[in-house]
Amino acid sequence: MTAAATDRLLDLFHGVRLTPTQRRIAHCLVQHAATVPYLSAAEVAELAGVSQPSVTRFAVALGHDGYPALRRRVRELTGAAPAEPTAGDNELQRAVRAEIGNLDRLAGQLADRDRIARAGALLAASRPLPVLGLRAAAPLAAYFAYFAAKVHPDVRVLDTGGSLLTDRLEQAAAAGADALLAFVLPRYPRETLDALHAARDAGLRVVAITDSPVSPATDHAELVLPAAVGTDLVFDLHTAPMTLAMVVLQAICDAAPTDTQARLEAFEASAARRQLFIG
């Protein structure tokens, strides 16, 4: 599905206050937009992990007479036909091809450079820069922070939950932080959303990398940067969110090019002096 079709689909939900269950259904529509227009309410309910009556109530909440009317509307908005698998593909190949599709949709979204530039400027100016990622999102937070530390003087990874997490958020704010980068990925840990609430209470502006424009992160973030998660294997694939993380880091570099260059040169000099690398 093209970025334009995604935008048209998201317009269905604009201005509608969705319950958590309805948000799950909306997320399902976005994630499976190519096939949803051809599925029954029961099949959508199974995909979203909700009851069939919940799908019907969701359709009514969006102003439709029922699910069949919503399905017709989604079909009109997306112009989608069921995707045909490449002849001979096995399930592993299909999973990889689905990731290629996720990256292609991300590329389309990046045509709007203003949002990425705004995120980069906000995060580059935060001293320190806290980076939140719990459970499945923790490796992405660590990966981002490893490279961000080469161009930012104080990156703080928050990858452990519990009562100390709020302490660390408040400490970062007290030290001068005014922004937080958060990775919010399915299955959306409750403690992650609690941390986002605490971050806002501490005065931090939240930039969220998440899997969907209708994820629970949207209730807490000033800027939401979506990148779809692959769901065709036993465990999720995070190819697009990781790519988006590096795009955000590029935007941070672009927001402070002089400081970035100076810090990179200092790191290279230190690495050469210590003979860190063999190549």
Image (cartoon, helix red, strand yellow):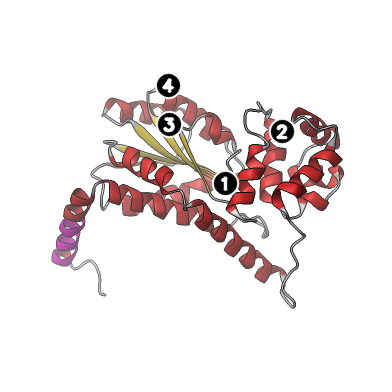
Q: As shown in the figure, which amino acid type bears the numbered disc 4?
A: Asp
Q: Position of residue 28 (x, y in %)?
A: 70, 45
Q: What is the C-alpha distance between the residues marked 1 and 3? A: 23 Å
Between marks 4 and 2 in the image, the one whose residue lies nearer the viewer: 2
Residue type, mark 3 in image: Leu
In the rendered structure, does residue 267 fall within the stretch colored magenta?
Answer: yes
Q: CA distance from mark 1 to mark 2?
A: 16 Å
* Residue type, numbered disc 2: Gln
Query: Closer to the N terminus: mark 2 or mark 3?
Result: 2
Secondary structure found at label 3: helix
Element carrying mark 4: helix
> In the image, is residue 270 part of the stretch drawn in magenta?
yes
Q: Is residue 265 visible?
A: yes
Give the residue pinned by disc 2.
Answer: 22
Asked if the residues shown at circle 1 and circle 3 are in contact, with their CB atoms under 8 angstroms apart, the answer is: no
Question: Which one is in front, 115 or 237?
Answer: 115
Of mark 1 and mark 3, the one earlier in the sequence is 3
User: Residue 187, located in which quarter of the rendered image?
Assistant: top right
Q: Quadrant of residue 57?
A: top right
Around disc 1, counting alpha carbons within 10 Å, would you say few (fewer than 14), some (14 to 19), or many (20 or more)?
many
Q: Is residue 72 left or right of residue 12?
A: right
Q: Are marks 3 and 4 in contact (CB under 8 Å)?
A: no
User: CA gap, disc 4 to disc 1?
Assistant: 24 Å
Q: Which residue is mark 3?
A: 165
Q: Is residue 110 left or right of residue 101?
A: left
| C-alpha gap between disc 2 and disc 3 | 29 Å
**Mark nearer the N terminus (4 vs 2):** 2
Q: Residue at x 79, y 39 (%)?
A: 70
| Range shown magenta | 264-273
